[in-house]
Image: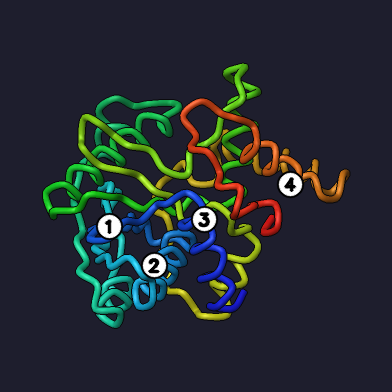
Amino acid sequence: MKLQRLYSLARKAIDTYQMIDNGDHIAVGISGGKDSLTLLYALNGIMKFYPQKFSLTAITVDLGFGSFDLSSVSELCEEFSIPYKIISTDIGKILFQERQESNPCSLCAKLRKGALNKAAKDLGCNKVAYAHHREDLIETMLLSLIYEGRFYAFSPYTYLDRMDLTVIRPLMLVPEADIKGFQKKYELPVCKNPCPMDGHTKREYAKTLMNTLEKENPGAKTRLFHAIVSGNIPGWPVCSPTLPLSRTL
């Protein structure tokens, strides 16, 4: 995927769901993986020409699993002239040593997001950008159907009233395959995830299921995503009829 296509898809999502307003200070959650670094590229580029003026601060929540070298991420942020903050936590120790959680992913996500949101507020941000891409939404929908019996997926934006923060997802239209291609083309400084549960989660099961459905029924991903954006999911904003997302799927 070329940089221009990334800008196009991200801006399509931003415009359709009015994710960015003039004067926004957006915290970009950086895990060190390909998705969050692609998001950083997208917002850094869009910031230069977007009609609504906004600023960025990159934030990484270090879960405390030991060696986690983020120097390459720091160098990228410096190249982009984006402030970068690393938040040290003991989340890993709490989950795996103190609580000895057998299924820690849900609690980990809650604690990680809590730490990110608090840091964003402390740094004066009013919005937080997450790097969820198209397949993330589909996987979430499948997990919700299988384990909760309801039709649900992440909303393009969510207002957190307790924190007075708005979460936005500018990469929601970007296929994961395009992000992988972008990573290789632009040599993103990806940092290996030190979490011992990486690759062994229910989300990996959903990913495998989704890929099987696509292989056996070509176009299944596109149709599943269309069902999400047009499915009137509670809490989802209405898609503007002047910006039909179906043309980008």
CA–CA distance in space, label 4 to label 2 = 25 Å
Say if mark 2 contacts mark 1, CB within 8 Å.
yes
| Three-letter code, disc 2 | Leu
The residue beneath circle 3 is: 13
Q: Point out the tag, 4 or 2, that comes first from the N-terminus.
A: 2
| Three-letter code, disc 4 | Lys
Q: What kind of element bears circle 2? A: helix
Q: Percent from the top left, x then y, of residue 236?
A: 50, 34
Seen in the image, is 111 located left or right of residue 132? Answer: left
CA–CA distance in space, label 3 to label 1 = 16 Å
Q: Quadrant of the N terminus?
A: bottom right
Q: What kind of element bears circle 4? A: helix
Q: Point out the tag, 2 or 1, that comes first from the N-terminus.
A: 1
| Three-letter code, disc 1 | Ile
Say if mark 4 contacts mark 2, CB within 8 Å.
no
Say if mark 3 contacts mark 1, CB within 8 Å.
no
| Farthest residue, direction front | 242
Q: Point out the tag, 1 or 4, that comes first from the N-terminus.
A: 1
| Three-letter code, disc 3 | Ala
CA–CA distance in space, label 2 to label 1 = 9 Å
The residue carrying pointer 4 sits among few (fewer than 14), some (14 to 19) or many (20 or more) residues within 10 Å by Cα, namely: many
Q: Percent from the top left, x then y, of residue 166?
A: 31, 43
Q: Is residue 131 above or below residue 57?
A: above
The residue beneath circle 2 is: 43
Q: In this view, does 119 lie above or below 55?
A: above
Residue at (23, 63) in percent of width and height: 57
Labels 4, 2: front one: 2
The residue beneath circle 4 is: 221
Residue at (55, 78) in percent of width and height: 4
The residue beneath circle 1 is: 26
